[in-house]
Image (cartoon, rainbow, N blue to C red):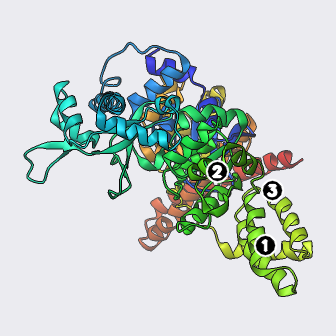
Amino acid sequence: MSQVEDVRAAADIVKVVGEYVQLRKAGANMMGLCPFHQEKTPSFAVHPGKQIFHCFGCGAGGDVFKFIMLIDNVTFSEALERLADKVGIRLTQTGPAGNDSRSQERTALYKIHEIAAKFYATQLTGTSEGRAAKAYLLDRGLKDEVIGRFLLGYAPRDGQALTRHLNSLGFSEDLLLKTGLVLRDGAGSHLFDRFRGRVIFPIANESGKVIAFGGRTLGDDQPKYLNSPETPIYTKSRVLYHLDSGGKAIRKQDYAILVEGYMDCIAVDSCGIENVVASCGTSLTDAQIRLLGRYSRRVVVNYDPDSAGMAATERSLNALLEAGFEVKVLALPGGLDPDSFIRKRGEAEYRRLLAEAPGYIDYLTDRAISVHGLKSPQGKLAVANAVLPYLARMPNSILRSEMTGRLAVRAMLDDRLLREELKRAAVERRPEIAGRPTEFKASPAERKLLRAFIEEPEVMDELLPGLVSDGILSGLVTEEIFTRLLEVRNSGETVDIHSFSENLNSEGRQLLHECLLASEDIPSREDAIRFCDALRRRKIERELSALNPAIDAAGKEQDWTRLAALNQNKVFLLKELARIRETLEIGNKTLTK
Ligand SMILES: [Zn+2]
């Protein structure tokens, strides 16, 4: 076996996917909500036996490597490395697969970021300018230990300090520019540092590798925060700050505290509350939500919902709700952010409010009640109308029903009436439907037969040769797949689904995966025979419909010999058709009994 096969065999796709998607058993397969498109009902299937996945909603599909490539946005060789790492296989093979230029470049970029992080950290203690910056941090209540743990640093005002340092280590100019940490001036003549005179916050990926930096000014320079640009190793929308060290606590406590900025995150963590991450902005992206969902689906959002960024905050809260998260809202009094609040009011008070944070729906209900009041019927109705659209977004029907009941009690409204209104709100929302994948015109019989053959090789050996030699499959979308299957069997090999689908075009591959991950039971041998008959019948029907115009033509031309032959053929086909119909009917009757 090649190393790729070793890793694929060792890395169970159900386990790997399970870290990102909650899978439930559904017949022979596992189903869950697709991580590659927004959906409320699961159309994402995993085949434990064949180790493949396929989404019936967006068409994404493949093996375990493909899954990691898509979800982590990495190359094949990186996916291979990650999975090998996970299952404890040491990769020895150095070939084009394990050593392409893109992954070499990324390795170099990681290295430069590691060096830069150390460089900035040294500046914080080793220079007078840096010590002033450190004094500022200490003044804001950060302890030495915290500064060290978060690898905080300082970028000198000088403007070329990092560039010189990296140059001296022999990195190419091209590579330095790719990090985004080094820029070229307008005239193109010299290089300089992106971050100048700023406190530096290293941003790490999930596995703790530094991939970018955030820089905060000490004075009034604008912008207050400056970030690394997107690079081959950094996509802002896919990163949650502090997830590398907070992730474990999030899993353990089964909830996360979501804050806006680096300083908020550090302040909360400094209280000994480790399960905190920062989204670096209030516009939470789908990728960040998916990322968080792999650790816990319960979250306390500690943004300020009444701040200037209210619309963005509300979008983020709604997106979490729609993704099925249990969402609580921690709105600190006075509109304070967690950093300022903890400094002013103390850790104990923060912990108390955190423990009391209301659910998002309760929070919205409170807010609506404070605006509309419950004294008049109009007020009650206004409260209900303010909250119902949010309830309608909740994908989990049990939770939704529970929250609806609670709203009815709190707004003192009739529960049944409220549920009717909820239904209407849900309809009016009209969720967007994700783009449908290409439709393949393979008939159900073809699809089920393909599945039966691949799942049960003996059935394939019994039935497939006849189908091919009788030309039953000619002209069908699936013809090539069936023919190739027969070739593999004729060469005496077993069908390995991975190497087999690699040799198909993308449409064929998708079709095959769809068949294998269909929700129905795997067809039995008897079913397979019926499907063969159905295909035979369709072939005869096709031939018959081609025969009629030929018979007409022969009649007009008074070509009696040809007419006789054609009619004889027609009689034969009709008899054959009747025979097949009969067996199909018998089959159907026994099936329904
Ligand atoms: Zn999908």
Among numbered discs 3 and 1, the one appearing first in the sequence:
3
The answer to which of 266 and 71 lies nearer the viewer is: 266
Judged left or right of residue 258, residue 372 is right
Q: Secondary structure at mark 3?
A: helix
Q: Which mark is residue 43?
A: 2
Q: Marks 3/1: CA distance?
A: 15 Å
Q: Position of residue 352 (x, y in %)?
A: 75, 48
For the residue pair 534 and 558, the one nearer the viewer reads as 534
Q: Is there CB contact under 8 Å for labels 2 and 1?
A: no
Q: Which residue is more in the foreground, 182 or 91? A: 182
User: Residue 399 shows which numbered tag?
Assistant: 3
Amino acid beneath label 1: Lys
In the image, 25: left or right of 500?
right
Q: In terms of sequence position, does the residue under pointer 2 or pointer 3 come before the other?
A: 2
Residue 570 visible to the viewer: yes
| Up-down relation of residue 69 to residue 349 (above or below) | above
Residue type at the position of mark 3: Leu
Q: Are marks 2 and 3 in contact (CB under 8 Å)?
A: no
Specify the amino acid type for callout 2.
Ser
Q: Residues within 10 Å of mark 3 (few under 14, many from 20)?
A: some
Q: Residues within 10 Å of mark 1 (few under 14, many from 20)?
A: few
106 horizontally vs 16: left or right: left
Front disc: 3 or 1: 3
Is residue 46 shown above or below 550?
A: above
For the point 48% across and 42% down, the residue is 139
Q: Circle 1 is placed at which residue position?
A: 423
Classify mark 1: helix, strand or loop: helix
Going 42% across and 43% down the picture, which residue do you hit? 136
**Mark whose residue sits in front, 2 or 1:** 1
Disc 2 residue lies near ligand 1 with CB under 8 A: yes
* Mark 2 nearby-residue class (10 Å; few <14, some 14–19, many ≥20): some
